[in-house]
Image: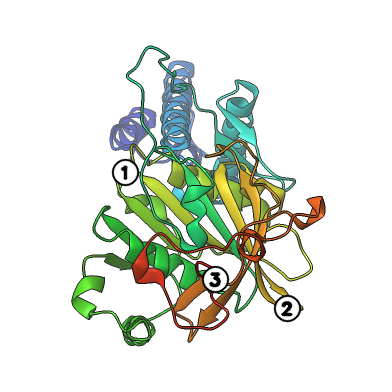
Amino acid sequence: MIDAQDVLRMISAMADKGEDPTLIAEFYERLTKEMDVPPEVQRQAFRLTIGQKNLEDKILQKNVENFLLSITGPIDIRDVMDFFNAKGEQKQKIYHIVQQKESQGVIVRTGNRHGHYRSVDRNPPIMNLSAPEVKQVKIELPFLLHDLVTLYARNIILVIGEKDGGKTAFAMNTAWLNRNAWKVRYFNSEMGLEELRGRLKKFNHPMSEWEKITWIEKAKQFEDFIDPDGLNIIDFLEVGAEAFTVTEDIRRVFDKLDDGLLLIVMQKRSYKEYAVGGQGTLEKARLAVNLEHNADGNLARIVVAKNWAGPDNPRGKVCKYKVWNGAEMKMTDYWHDPEKNEISPIRTRGFQYKNDSLSTKDPDFPREI
């Protein structure tokens, strides 16, 4: 026959093993239901169960706080509860912890959906104005875009294209033009290996030259494999159901850059001015180009040009182009601003690519006249 002291020893052992305080309390109540328990034993049992419960609450609080601080991207409160396998009362505790962290400014709400947060960065990168001057980077781009803008380390180039507008052709031509000057990483989100090989063969370049480029089959979380000092090409950045999160996707990749560059390909609907994801997609871009269909053919339009290479702002300038077999792409007109009644220079003084390797026998291709 057990007595009150025996029960006290048993629940003490359960507490030492870290048993659930609710289970300990239920065990105590069941065993002492028909028992005359001395007041001192009652007090010790109460302190034991309450003390264990407080300890578990403190541990949960600390674990949830550390978990929230460890996340660099979006935070969904449901993911937090799933991580801790929370049930019943514990879900409510986690909810209160998250609210507490929000009130303390550790996390902030994002978007318009309940339970979505992000961590607040407490360590802003301070820009040192006395640091050595960084020279512009040298890169070749289709349509001689590198002659119109100046690009620096950590710059983002955004290529926004309509369906079949030549987005992948632009990205692959950029990779090819810079394969010797840069360490190029090409993130391919759509094609399998054989389809990729077939696409590259359309260029009629030696496959050994394409092997100078690192090809990575990846559709999301590109930041895990970004070369901080190389030329990184993402073809393409997919936008999920919550389009507003795409700006955060771009920022996470941007934060991985040191001396490198990033070219991102995105989809654009024909009747929209911006990429899927809205105007916020242009936030970090130093150069952004729309590839559009026009009544006269394909039209490239500069929508962002932060650092001009000449005296005039290239923003708003357009040029016509052709794409051959989904591979080679060439300008058939030079950059001009139709809204200012500018006439393409090819019609007035002629035009020729500086790089002879880009020449073509196409009769519509501009050459010196």
Q: What crowding class fits label 3: few (fewer than 14 Cα within 10 Å), some (14-19), or many (20 or more)?
A: many
Q: CA distance from mark 3 to mark 1?
A: 37 Å
- Residue type at the position of mark 3: Pro
Here the colouring is: rainbow
- Of residues 68 and 305, the one nearer the viewer is 305
Instruction: Please state the horizontal and vertical placement of residue 246, each as a whole percent of the image.
Output: 59, 52
**Residue hosting label 2:** 296
Q: For the image shown, how many numbered marks are present on the structure?
A: 3
User: Which residue does the image show at 32% across and 66% down from the upper left?
Assistant: 216
**Residue hosting label 1:** 228
Q: CA distance from mark 1 to mark 2?
A: 40 Å
Q: Are marks 2 and 3 in contact (CB under 8 Å)?
A: no
In the rendered view, does 323 fall on the left or right side of 2? right
Mark 1 vs mark 2, foreground winner is: 2
Q: Are marks 3 and 1 in contact (CB under 8 Å)?
A: no
Instruction: Please state the horizontal and vertical placement of residue 356, each as a whole percent of the image.
Output: 36, 67
**Residue hosting label 3:** 366
Tell me which label, 3 or 1, sits earlier in the chain: 1
- Of residues 297 and 118, the one nearer the viewer is 297
- Residue type at the position of mark 2: Asp
The quadrant the N terminus occupies is top left
- Residue type at the position of mark 1: Pro
